[in-house]
Amino acid sequence: MVEKSYIDHLVASVFDNLQYQHEWTELKTLTHSPVDNSPLPRPLISGLPPRQLYLHPDDQIEMLKKHKSSKERIPETPVTEWVLPVHLSEKWTLRAFASVFDSMPQSTAPGRVKRVLLATVHDDSTVVYYFMHDGIVKPRQN
């Protein structure tokens, strides 16, 4: 188990990285679910990136069909993203990730949240972001 003060430091590092390096807005740190006030297994950060980070493959296909005939640029409206700060040395299991997905707030999107942005922090303060999906996702179309 990782100490609370260390987790707080990870969250603060990722929060600052999102705000000052990646220009996210409306950032909030959540330790309890806004839906039922139950404690989250790990603190999450919610925020709005400057542009949309991910487009589900099904949505991507529909947008490409819709905009194929026009020269109109495909809109990139940002949506609220959920970020899970972790350290590179932590050992995570599928069960631990499932508990995070099970506890995530569901009031902002219909149904269960399908992905989280995993913010992996290294000892030198480098932060690398990966999408972690809940379940299997078919590959994107290029």
Image (spheres, rainbow, N blue to C red):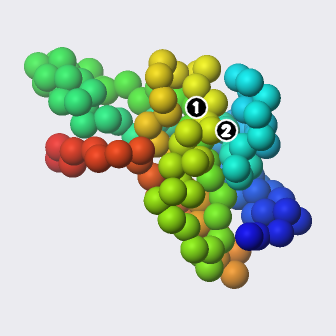
**What is the CA distance from the residue labelled 2 to the residue labelled 1?**
7 Å
Count the labels in the image: 2
User: Which residue in the rendered view is the most extreme toward the right?
Assistant: 5
Q: Secondary structure at mark 1?
A: loop
Where on the picture, by quarter, is residue 91? bottom right
Residue toward you, 42 or 16: 42
Q: x, y (%) of residue 135?
A: 35, 45
User: Does residue 47 appear to the left or right of 137 in the view shown?
Assistant: right
Q: Amino acid at mark 2?
A: Ser
Where on the picture, by quarter, is residue 6? bottom right
The residue carrying mark 2 is 46
- Whether residue 108 can be seen here: yes
Residue toward you, 131 or 70: 131
Quadrant of the rendering where the N terminus is positioned: bottom right
The residue carrying pointer 2 sits among few (fewer than 14), some (14 to 19) or many (20 or more) residues within 10 Å by Cα, namely: many
Q: Secondary structure at mark 2?
A: strand
Residue toward you, 4 or 62: 4
Query: What residue appears at the point 58 percent right and 48 percent down from the top-left corner?
Result: 99
The residue carrying mark 1 is 80
User: Does residue 125 appear to the left or right of 104 in the view shown?
Assistant: right
Where on the picture, by quarter, is residue 17? bottom right
Q: Amino acid at mark 1?
A: Thr
Query: What residue appears at the point 42 percent right and 30 percent down from the top-left corner?
Result: 76
